[in-house]
Image: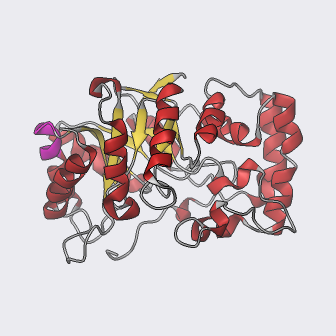
Amino acid sequence: MEFRHLGRSGMLVSEISYGNWITHGSQVEEDAADACVRAALDSGITTFDTADVYAGTRAEAVLGRALKGERREGLEIFTKVFWPTGSGRNDRGLSRKHIMESINGSLSRLQTDYVDLYQAHRYDYATPLEETMVAFADIVHSGKAHYIGVSEWKASEIRAAHALATELKISLVSSQPQYSMLWRVIEAEVVPTCEELGLGQIVWSPMAQGVLSGKYLPGQPPPAGSRATDEKSGAGFIARWLDEDVLTRVQLLKPLAEQAGLTMAQLAIAWVLQNPNVSSAIVGATRPEQVYDNVKASGVKLDADLMKAIDEIVEPITERDPGKTVSPAERP
């Protein structure tokens, strides 16, 4: 496993991190989740990403139990706040009330005194940015978080937050966007802004919800037990990629992966890691062998000819519109 600085901060993170978005507490049983975390640790992953909303707060609790007994200083644990975690009117958003209450809930479930990175899971248009950033600053200054990050924020929102963070003497160090060969909306505006301000990307869905693994074939139903067949969690997210043209073009990547000595999944993860602004790529898993396969993308260098060949195949199906980086207009 190789390591990178998270933005221009001094903290190093594993360039492949383990996330439990739609797996822990929902898609897989706890013993399977624990086995995947063991595989991540065995593979050299030290960076773990979750959120209070995942599986209705259960994902944080599962991760906390799985990591119990590990040397805390040897881990980087990330979580997030924004989406509803209860039925109350204030159980959502980025108000001071919700942030201050949510960090305590997350720390309790994760069984830790602090998180290394506390992230705003979306932008909250119902709360003044100053209120949000002051609350984050108080959490950092109290020792409950070391760094602050954002997820799916526009470049202009990141810039405004960074200016306030500088005034408040806290480190806004990261952005967590969706990013893959097929979804490149951050490249035009978010990446240049983050490069200027010193934020690194912690990217999610580098395999486009699994489509870039190549297991979804054109003209055929999704494999039994795959994310596309899980109506409770995964099917809605992957649906946009289950297009015949997309699936046909993805299959054209297979010879390129073989040429590079990689699986399709490894190629997809290695591709996002070629972007120097990417600090870490988040992978999830339902089986330990998926973790062991994915981590082999760490340290892989793709040559310019291969990168060009990939672009030529996926360009017609690639989304690049920076306007696709969105947060809810109203609190959910």
Judging depth in this view, the residue of 233 and 10 nearest the camera is: 233
Does 117 sit above or below residue 2? below
Q: Quadrant of residue 296?
A: top right
* Residue 257 horizontal/vertical position (percent): 81, 36
Scheme of colours in the image: secondary structure
Main SS category, magenta section: helix
Q: Estimate the x, y position of residue 247 in percent, counting from the top left.
A: 81, 60
Residue 163 position in % (x across, y down): 26, 45
- Asked if residue 289 lies in the magenta stretch, the reply is no
Residue found at x 88% / y 49%: 252
Can residue 96 be seen here? The reply is yes
Give whichever of 20, 123 is nearer the camera.
20
Residue at 77% of width from left, 32% of height from top? 262
In the rendered image, is residue 278 in sight?
no
Q: Which residues are magenta?
A: 137-143
Give the position of the C terminus as an image quadrant: bottom left
Q: Residue at x 55, y 23 (%)?
A: 1
In x, y percent, where is residue 263?
A: 76, 37
Look at the picture and state if 155 lies above or below 233: above
